[in-house]
Image (cartoon, rainbow, N blue to C red):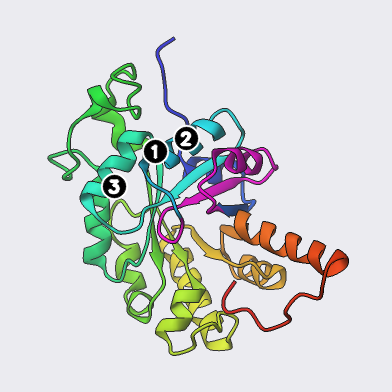
Amino acid sequence: MPLQLGPTFYSALSAQQGRSLAGMWVCSGSPLVAEICAGSGLDWVLIDAEHSPNGLESILAQLQAMYGYPVQAMVRPPVNDTVVIKQYLDLGVQNLLIPMVNSAFEAAAAVAAVRYPPHGVRGVGSALARASRWNRVPDYLATAGDTVSVTVQIESTAAVDAVEEILAVDGVDGIFLGPSDLAASMGLLGQQEHPEVRAAVERCIKAATAAGKPAGVNAFNPDTARAYLDAGASFVLVGADVAVLARASEALASEFVRPVDAAVKQSY
């Protein structure tokens, strides 16, 4: 049987028949931690390279560590850049979360970066790439676009204002709301639970529903996550490896060593 690539994130979402997907960030850069998270029972894992110490080699190692587990892997590059996206795709990344997309033009640029000419600008290097299993996947060049999903991140007031135009871009499979950066752009730094921020997030979820495209959101607060799910979010991130370790280790220190500083944490 010829080699085939696995389904994309949105194929998995559709297969759940209406159930929203719950996932977590992997920000440690550790393949071992990524594998632990992949086997947790969660639906998806987001490998982050925007705010985390992840380069090409560590992303590759984490994809390999998670391969074979019943979990979808999405990867966030540090920037919406054609060259960076090309490198991620050649590594075998199938699901991309593009940060800081503020307009339909920027969304279209992200889509073009994942498609080969004449439909896009992705450079051709499949013979050298894990993505095509080094040319072991039949007709990879012709079918590669079907193996990749593009999710764009709405995390500024400009993006919220343009969300309908962003959703209308052909090739944008879904949107993902980032309440922390959105709060900052609204002059509410560190207040992602503020009613105005939540209203903006819910407005974008509603716009996505109207456009027939899924919307996801970052929500570490369980009550907030459930509220966004009730508002129509199709997928959520409800934790992060580094946050789980930080809070759990603080709890150990509080019980056995000393009280933990009770100062209010900024953001998640």
Q: Position of residue 34 (x, y in %)?
A: 58, 42
Q: Amino acid at mark 1?
A: Glu
Which callout, 2 or 3, points to the residue nearer the camera? 2
Residue furthest to the top: 1
Residue for badge 2: 61
> What residue is rendered at 42% in x and 36% in y?
60
Q: Position of residue 184 (x, y in %)?
A: 44, 82
- Where disc 1 sits, the SS reads helix
Cα distance between the residues tagged 1 and 2: 6 Å
Alpha-carbon neighbours of circle 1 within 10 Å: few (<14), some, or many (≥20)? few
- The magenta segment: 26-52
Q: Is residue 233 magenta?
A: no
Residue for badge 1: 57
- Where disc 3 sits, the SS reads helix
User: Residue 1 sits in which quadrant?
Assistant: top left
User: Residue 107 sits in which quadrant?
Assistant: bottom left
Q: Is residue 40 magenta?
A: yes
